[in-house]
Image (cartoon, rainbow, N blue to C red):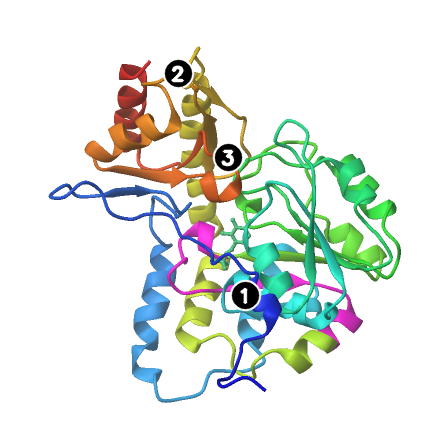
Amino acid sequence: MTNRPEVNPSILEIAAYVPGKSKAAPGIEPIKLSANESPLGASPKAQEAYRYHAHNLAIYPDGAATQLREAIGEVHGLDPQKIGVGSGSDELLHLIAQLYLQPGDEAVMSQFGFLVYPIVTRGAGGTPIFAAETDLKTDVDAMLGAVTEKTKVVYLANPNNPTGSYLTADELDRLHAGLPKNVLLVIDAAYAEYVDAADYKLGIDLVDAHQNVVVTRTFSKIGLANLRVGWLYGPDHFMDGFNRLRGPFNVNGAAMKAAEAAVRDVEFTAQLKAHNKRLRSLLEAELQSNWYRTRPSQGNFVLTEFSEEPGHTAKDAFEALLQEGLVVREMASYGLPNALRISIGHEKDMKKLMQVLQSLN
Ligand SMILES: *Cc1c(COP(=O)(O)O)cnc(C)c1O
């Protein structure tokens, strides 16, 4: 017996998630380009819905999230019965891990995948298994090669954060086809709104045709990060387990109202996408030089790799940007110490960022 309560050993294996910095040098107003937030804020209709809900704070929300699920279903052409919502997709990822992982089980994920996957895996007592990437992209063969009899879940961010790379529809099909039927494939499409690659697919067809696929989405990257709303689409047997485990009122009412307005405001989402695409292309084109390499991205951010040459490293660039108030994301926690992830912001801030980086060139 120990002389105090001890947290589960697998929890102590967790390296706590380190969010992107939000402070610049002292006295400088920070421009936050470190968390992949919407530079255009939230849909005005979502803001209005949120304000309207202020008079309703004493009332429990609709635990079934009926109106929000119906709105998502209508806009995306999906059966609301197969839609579940959560307090951010982070909560959904935790719930999925709890549904399928026990001590001794393994979850497979990509080497530079989203850092929440190992956290939720260990939180449920499971063991994360990392599949090596090829050129900063998920390697389907390596993922399949990492699957053993202990594997219960495979997590894939598509497109991936922080690399910006994605699996094509064919590659996604190949990954799914190679998995045993008892292994759940979680397709985390947090950046789906920003994708324009013609050979990309969400994987909704895989959910419909099989029993072992779930797609997760979020409102965080389209302007509602502060409200914490995510949603998923899964088969009936999955939804049954999900609805047993989740908190009975796991998303607050004001957030649901705002999310409902946001999902219906397709013009605002299109505007965000167009803004993102224009500046992402500009950044991708400008930040190619001897010293940097910017990866093509399907998200609302780019990953730029820097040189090992003193004066031209990621650390040098990070510090120079910080002096101008530009706060980007350091990547050491992802095992990419010489890269920075840059969220797409306002045009003037992107121009300033390019100037600073060119001056280091
Ligand atoms: C941002 C992000 C999420 C989700 O976030 P929530 O804010 O919890 O909805 C999920 N997956 C990836 C890959 C992300 O980058």
> Which residue in the protein does label 2 denote?
309
Q: Earlier in the sequence, mark 1 or mark 2?
A: 1
Q: Nearer the viewer, residue 102 or 188?
A: 102
Magenta stretch bounds: 219-240
Q: On the rendered image, what quadrant is the C terminus found in?
A: top left
Magenta stretch containing residue 232, yes or no? yes
**Quadrant housing residue 220:** bottom left
Q: Residues within 10 Å of mark 1 (few under 14, many from 20)?
A: few
Residue 166 image position (x, y, % from top left): 64, 36
Q: Residues within 10 Å of mark 2 (few under 14, many from 20)?
A: few
> Which residue in the protein does label 1 denote?
12
Residue 156 image position (x, y, % from top left): 67, 48
Q: Number of numbered discs present?
A: 3
> Which residue in the protein does label 3 denote?
336
Residue 13 image position (x, y, % from top left): 57, 61
Q: Amino acid at mark 2?
A: Glu
Q: Earlier in the sequence, mark 3 or mark 2?
A: 2
